[in-house]
Image (cartoon, rainbow, N blue to C red):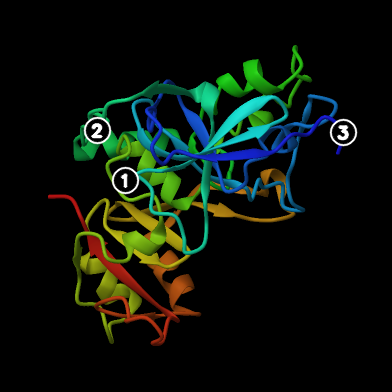
């Protein structure tokens, strides 16, 4: 491709090896940011047939600390291959971040300041997200404003701002947003997070009576959150439907019954290689 220069420079022995997110920042699993954001016409977003950016792993919060592993030159910009304690990438997945989202430092920076909001504040945040679109890898319902400045031609086409700026949340992103990044970002971690409830062999009604607000009904791939004694909330992808899904509430017992049509309740998540057509309930907040 004309004009495309790719040079990978490992950071071994180099001075600058850490970066701190200056603002909300998209972390991708591929280094070609301009192919995802803007495209050749600078008004496009690379999506699949469900309108999702599968290259997006998560949205880093301001102050997130990254270790810089490698510098990659792409289309005249420096893209870093990174790792962070705040996001455990799936096996075999590499993380990349545009250098313009980072403050580079030679010293190990302090970790991002984290504060767990109170239970009522978390619930209120989730209620405020009802109707927000589903965005794969998204955990900020307002989107990432900096994308407009760095990648897109202004003004953005009318009615496209939310889509182009990744305004929305996925299932674990809804929880991550409401807790200010306190909780794990992936369901693969949430299935072990907090304390498991004894639900094996119980009916939907029996399980519902055990649950408290903010308990997690979770399996690897999705999480449903108990909003109050009668209601669940979740961000679900509904490919082909208006908006491709988003944040919705459902009656608690009804949602548990729906889950139990395909999955069985378990007290703990099975060990690797064991039966995975189950779900668990995790209680993580006091």
Q: Is residue 27 visible?
A: yes
How far across and down, in percent of the image, does residue 179 sit? 30, 39
Mark 2 and mark 1: Cα distance apart in space: 9 Å
Residue at (34% x, 75% y) in the render: 204
Q: Quadrant of the N terminus?
A: top right
How many residues crowd around disc 1 within 10 Å: few (fewer than 14), some, or many (20 or more)? few
How far across and down, in percent of the image, does residue 64 sit? 35, 32
Point out the residue furthest to the front here: 13
How far across and down, in percent of the image, does residue 252 sit? 37, 61
How many residues crowd around disc 3 within 10 Å: few (fewer than 14), some, or many (20 or more)? few
Which of disc 2 and disc 3 is earlier in sequence? Answer: 3
Badge nearest the viewer, 3 or 2: 3
The label on residue 183 is: none
Disc 3 element: loop
Image vertical order of residue 32 relative to residue 260, above or below: above
Residue at (26% x, 31% y) in the render: 108
Occupied quadrant, residue 41: top right
**According to the image, label 1 marks what residue?**
85
Image vertical order of residue 173 relative to residue 43, above or below: below
The label on residue 2 is: 3
**According to the image, label 2 marks what residue?**
111
Q: Nearer the viewer, residue 44 or 95?
A: 95
Mark 3 and mark 2: Cα distance apart in space: 40 Å
Q: Nearer the viewer, residue 156 or 83?
A: 83
Which of disc 3 and disc 1 is earlier in sequence? Answer: 3
Q: Nearer the viewer, residue 51 or 238?
A: 51
Disc 2 element: loop
Mark 1 and mark 3: Cα distance apart in space: 37 Å
Cβ atoms under marks 2 and 1 closer than 8 Å: yes
Residue at (69% x, 38% y) in the render: 6
Q: Nearer the viewer, residue 110 or 144?
A: 110
């Amino acid at each position: 491709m004309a004009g495309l220069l790719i040079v990978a420079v490992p950071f071994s022995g180099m001075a600058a090896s850490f970066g701190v997110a200056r603002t909300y920042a998209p972390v991708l699993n591929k280094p070609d940011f301009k192919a995802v954001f803007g495209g050749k016409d600078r008004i496009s977003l690379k999506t699949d047939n469900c309108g999702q950016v599968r290259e997006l792993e998560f949205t880093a919060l301001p102050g997130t600390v990254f270790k810089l592993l490698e510098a990659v030159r792409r289309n005249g910009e420096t893209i870093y291959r990174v790792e962070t304690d705040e996001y455990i990438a799936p096996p075999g997945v590499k993380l990349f971040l545009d250098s313009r989202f980072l403050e580079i430092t030679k010293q190990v920076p302090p970790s991002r300041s984290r504060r767990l909001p109170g239970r009522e504040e978390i619930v209120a945040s989730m209620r405020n997200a009802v109707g927000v679109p589903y965005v794969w890898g998204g955990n900020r319902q307002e989107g990432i404003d900096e994308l407009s400045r760095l990648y897109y031609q202004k003004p953005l086409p009318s009615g496209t701002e939310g889509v182009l700026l990744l305004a929305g949340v996925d299932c674990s992103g809804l929880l991550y947003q409401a807790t200010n990044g306190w909780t794990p970002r992936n369901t693969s971690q949430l299935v072990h997070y907090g304390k498991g409830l004894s639900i094996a062999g119980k009916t939907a009604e029996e399980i519902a009576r055990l649950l408290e607000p903010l308990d997690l009904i979770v399996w690897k791939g999705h999480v449903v959150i108990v909003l109050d004694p009668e209601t669940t909330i979740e961000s679900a992808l509904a490919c082909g439907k208006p908006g491709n899904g988003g944040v919705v509430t459902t009656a608690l017992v009804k949602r548990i019954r729906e889950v139990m049509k395909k999955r069985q309740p378990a007290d703990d998540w099975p060990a690797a290689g064991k039966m995975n057509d189950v779900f668990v309930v995790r209680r993580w907040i006091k």
